[in-house]
Image: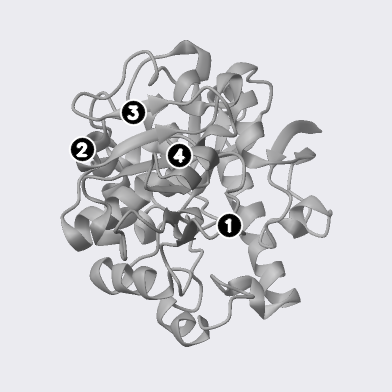
Amino acid sequence: MLTLRAAFSGNNPRVAPLLDGTVTPAGFELEWETGDMGEMAARHLQENTSDVFEFSISDYLNIRSRADARWDWIALPIFCSKALLQLNTWVNVHSGITGPEELRGKRLAVGDYTMTAFLWFRAMLNRLYGVRSQDIAWYNGRVGEHSHSALLGVKDTPPQGVSITFLDRLEAANELLQSGQIDAAGATGLPIDTSTPHVQPLFPDRGNAFLKEFFDRVGFLPVNHTVLIQRRLIDDNPWLPEALYEAFERSKEEAYRRDPAARRVFPQRPGSQEHESAFGADPYLSGVAANRAMLSMACDQALSDGLMQKPVAVDDLFAPSLQGT
């Protein structure tokens, strides 16, 4: 029996039936590692010891646009999470920022310039308000071996025309925001101290209206992560991508059977219930066809952000046997 080392964040209800063994894959076994997604992704980039693993879409686009033998990975069109961290952005009360359209010309700290949530934030700002990645001064909050941007070479070769300052301490983003030396911050690696009078949320409604406006404009919600597999495993086991795809689909359906809230984008957020029906019966659709518009926009934004060195066709991102899904 083929045994695969699998790594996934442990708090996703749509994957839980696979993790707890309720759903059993056909033809192989999974040995699971769970933990913080950011930390595990940094380890994938450094050690590359997992066979199948959850990974950032934006970091994957960066890797796929260049030839690097260290990371010979291919994606499966499985999308079990939404990119929502950007909605938890905080602003200094003296910044003059009262809405996301006012981030033009401002200083914004994030965990990593490369992180998917802020690739989507840039896409959302551009589509809704015409604010480009080049219009914001970016501060990279993760440091050292924890920074995906550094591991992917963005620190050494920053995107042309984009201002990125790499902070040297995890505490720096919060300190700079509190003092007003930067204007906004979100998902910076360490939580922002929101108990002080110096900061307030960019989205008082936690982003409900902003996300709904974007959905109404483009017809989809931004997706955070996908599932990657070592290409060598497909070379030896060409049936494996379809078997994995089927296992993740069965896990999602079992999660929906267990708890209807697993279908929701904001399962516990007050004020979001009226939006949920607009997101469709299954907001976590798998497959290339159902996600082509989303993937095309992600590719376009990664090129605009300087995260891709050259265009990559959407179909080429995925294992050949699943390109027709």
Residue, x 21% and y 45% (percent of image)? 105
Q: Position of residue 120 (x, y in %)?
A: 36, 51
Does the residue at mark 2 contact the one at mark 4 (Cβ under 8 Å)?
no
The residue singled out by tag 3 in the image is: 164
Q: Real-space Cα distance between discs 2 and 4?
A: 16 Å
Q: Pick whichever of labels 1 and 4 is earlier in the sequence.
A: 4
Foreground: disc 1 or disc 4: 1
- Name the foreground residue: 285 vs 190: 190
Residue, x 65% and y 33% (percent of image)? 39
Label 2: few (<14), some (14–19) or many (≥20) C-alpha neighbours in 10 Å: some
Query: Of all residues shown, which one is farthest toward the bottom?
Result: 274
The three-letter amino acid code for the residue at tag 3 is Ile
Colour basis: one colour
Q: Real-space Cα distance between discs 3 and 1?
A: 27 Å
The residue singled out by tag 4 in the image is: 115
Q: Real-space Cα distance between discs 3 and 2?
A: 10 Å
The three-letter amino acid code for the residue at tag 1 is Thr
Note whether 258 is above or below 35 in the view shown: below
The residue singled out by tag 1 in the image is: 196
Quadrant of residue 94 within the rendered picture: bottom left
Foreground: disc 3 or disc 4: 3
Note whether 212 is above or below 93 in the view shown: below
Dividing the image into 4 quarters, which one contains the N terminus? top right
The residue singled out by tag 2 in the image is: 134
Label 1: few (<14), some (14–19) or many (≥20) C-alpha neighbours in 10 Å: few
Number of labels in the image equals: 4
Q: Position of residue 59 (x, y in %)?
A: 44, 33
The three-letter amino acid code for the residue at tag 2 is Gln
